[in-house]
Amino acid sequence: MRSSILTFTGFTRLFKPKNPNTLVTYKLYTKVFKQEFPKLSFRPPRSDTCRVCDELACKIKASKKSSDLVVSKSALELHHRKAGQALRVLKQNAASSQLPGSNQSTICIDLQQVLFVPTLVHSDMFYKRQLSCYNFCVHMFDTDKAIMCMWHEGIAQRGSNEMISCLLQVFNTHDFKDDLVVWRDNCAG
């Protein structure tokens, strides 16, 4: 999977092969880009962070001693390396489940953020009660299909019983191989 985050360095690398006769440098490219597109900026995509990342980021910001800063930064780096290793194992599991003759099915499960209905933005809606909707996602890597189990708070909440009910529904309606590998985030449910 390729990263979709582009930077000035990435843009320069893409620009050079397509325009080999130009003498554009990274510095010039950045200067022109900032002048021509002043409202554009680069940032990592918004995503969920885990409790450990948030805690260590707060410690880094609040550290007054350099020794505390070094300890927190190294702990965060180690945590990110472990997360990267887990992602590599997930990709290996996904690839091995797609091999012909494989006896393994790999799925990834996650509960999406709460969806509020209706999604109106005028000021009156701020004070009105909206209906909370839940979406439990199951991605099956061997068939590259996704199954969504969706319900609203009038039917059920979002506890462990609801998650197991969704998984049971998926297991009863889809065929899996003998060896099942399930990946999930840190959601306790």
Image (spheres, rainbow, N blue to C red):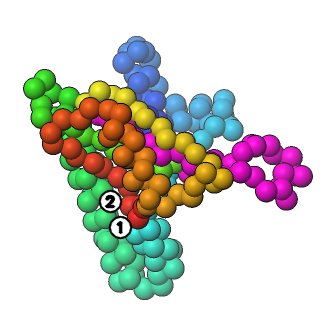
Tell me which residue sits at (33%, 38%) in the image: 172
List x then y, in percent, for residue 52: 40, 69
Is disc 2 surrounded by few (<14), some (14 to 19) or many (20+) residues within 10 Å? some
Q: Secondary structure at mark 1?
A: helix
Q: Nearer the viewer, residue 60 or 122?
A: 122
Residue 14 lies in the magenta stretch = no
List x then y, in percent, for residue 2: 35, 33
Q: CA distance from mark 1 to mark 2?
A: 6 Å
- For this orientation, the residue located farthest to the right is 124
Residue 98 vs 131, above or below: the answer is: above
Q: Which quarter of the figure has residue 16?
A: top left
Residue 101 vs 179, above or below: the answer is: above
Quadrant in the picture for the C terminus: bottom left
Do tag 1 and tag 2 residues touch (Cβ < 8 Å)? yes
Q: Which numbered circle lies on residue 80?
A: 2
Q: Is residue 98 left or right of residue 60?
A: left
Q: Nearer the viewer, residue 183 or 175?
A: 175
List x then y, in percent, for residue 49: 46, 59
Q: Is residue 89 left or right of residue 68?
A: left
Could you tell me the amino acid type at mark 1?
Leu
Tell me which residue sits at (42%, 15%) in the image: 19
Tell me which residue sits at (47%, 81%) in the image: 63
Q: Which numbered circle lies on residue 76?
A: 1
Could you tell me the amino acid type at mark 2?
His
Q: Is residue 92 left or right of residue 60?
A: left
Q: Secondary structure at mark 2?
A: helix
Range shown magenta: 113-141
Tell me which residue sits at (48%, 38%) in the image: 148
List x then y, in percent, for residue 43: 53, 46
